[in-house]
């Protein structure tokens, strides 16, 4: 009788441990996947940007194990520029998807400075045989002043990309309207929800297919 109770207790504890492991594995699946990508080294794809990029579960969204999420939450393009060597170039990816600018705009950084930072980063990537793909800056919700600055930055990015044969992705055409970022594609004024990330991932997958990566 005592042996049977111990067996039941043991089986129950094992079941709880397995369930806990599975739940934690599911909740932290992207972090675990990123650890494997890092250990494997030389990712084909690097995602680079601020918290909007950082919050994407890219391994799952793209269905690939060769994508490294090296975004810098809360940072501006100045910080991207300072760290692009270690966070992107030294990893020797085939392509870097880069997105940013909204933190600069929020901080009141001048357009000339933001543009210069982007220009330098894109040139550095091309000089190191890394294909850059720019995701244009997404609007904030119901902020006309911010929207005006985003329009100015995106106009520059489109022009620079066109002149240098760089592919760009315009998420605003899907997730924004005349008032900025739509509520059905956002979790707050600035950040995207799961539905928006799926659209972004679909656009990224299309670009990767076009570039045979």
Image (cartoon, rainbow, N blue to C red):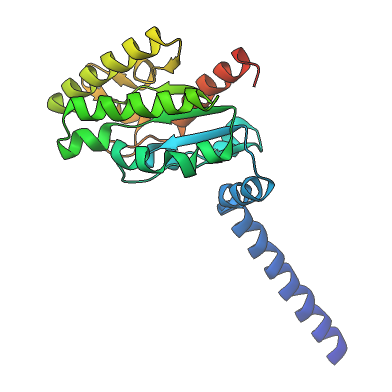
User: Residue 84 versus residue 98: which sits nearer the camera?
Assistant: 84
Q: Report the residue at 34% width, 13% height from top.
A: 160
Q: Report the residue at 53% width, 35% height from top.
A: 46
Along the horizontal axis of the image, is 140 left or right of 204? left
- Horizontal and vertical percent for residue 158? 34, 13
Q: Quadrant of the C terminus?
A: top right
- Horizontal and vertical percent for residue 24? 60, 59
| Number of numbered discs on residues | 0
- State which quadrant residue 184 falls in: top left
The extreme bottom residue here reads: 2
Q: Quadrant of the N terminus?
A: bottom right
Along the horizontal axis of the image, is 75 left or right of 39? left
The extreme front residue here reads: 127
Q: Is residue 211 visible?
A: yes
Along the horizontal axis of the image, is 48 left or right of 22? left
- Horizontal and vertical percent for residue 191? 34, 37
Whether residue 188 is situated above or below residue 99 in the rendered picture = below
Q: Report the residue at 61% width, 48% height from top.
A: 38
Whether residue 196 is situated above or below residue 41 in the rendered picture = above
Q: Is residue 1 visible?
A: no
- Horizontal and vertical percent for residue 150? 23, 23
User: Residue 213 versus residue 163: which sits nearer the camera?
Assistant: 163
User: Residue 123 versus residue 205: which sits nearer the camera?
Assistant: 123
Whether residue 9 is situated above or below residue 112 in the rendered picture = below
């Amino acid at each position: 009788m005592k042996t049977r109770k111990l067996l039941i207790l043991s089986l129950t504890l094992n079941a709880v441990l397995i369930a806990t492991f599975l739940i934690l594995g599911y909740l932290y699946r992207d972090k675990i996947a990123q650890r494997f990508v890092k250990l494997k080294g030389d990712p084909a794809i690097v995602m680079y940007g601020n918290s909007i990029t950082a919050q994407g579960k890219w391994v799952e969204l793209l269905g690939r194990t060769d994508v490294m999420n090296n975004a810098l939450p809360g940072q501006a393009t100045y910080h991207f520029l300072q760290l692009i060597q270690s966070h992107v170039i030294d990893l020797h990816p085939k392509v870097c998807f880069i997105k940013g600018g909204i933190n600069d705009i929020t901080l009141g950084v001048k357009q000339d400075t933001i543009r210069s930072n982007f220009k330098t980063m894109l040139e550095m990537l091309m000089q190191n045989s890394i294909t850059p793909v720019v995701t244009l800056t997404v609007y904030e919700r119901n902020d006309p002043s911010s929207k005006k600055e985003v329009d100015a930055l995106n106009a520059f990015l489109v022009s620079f990309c066109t002149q240098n044969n760089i592919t760009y992705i315009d998420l605003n055409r899907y997730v924004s309207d005349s008032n900025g970022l739509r509520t059905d594609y956002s979790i707050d004024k600035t950040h995207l929800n799961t539905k928006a990330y799926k659209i972004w991932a679909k656009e990224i997958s299309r670009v990767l297919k076009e570039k045979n990566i």
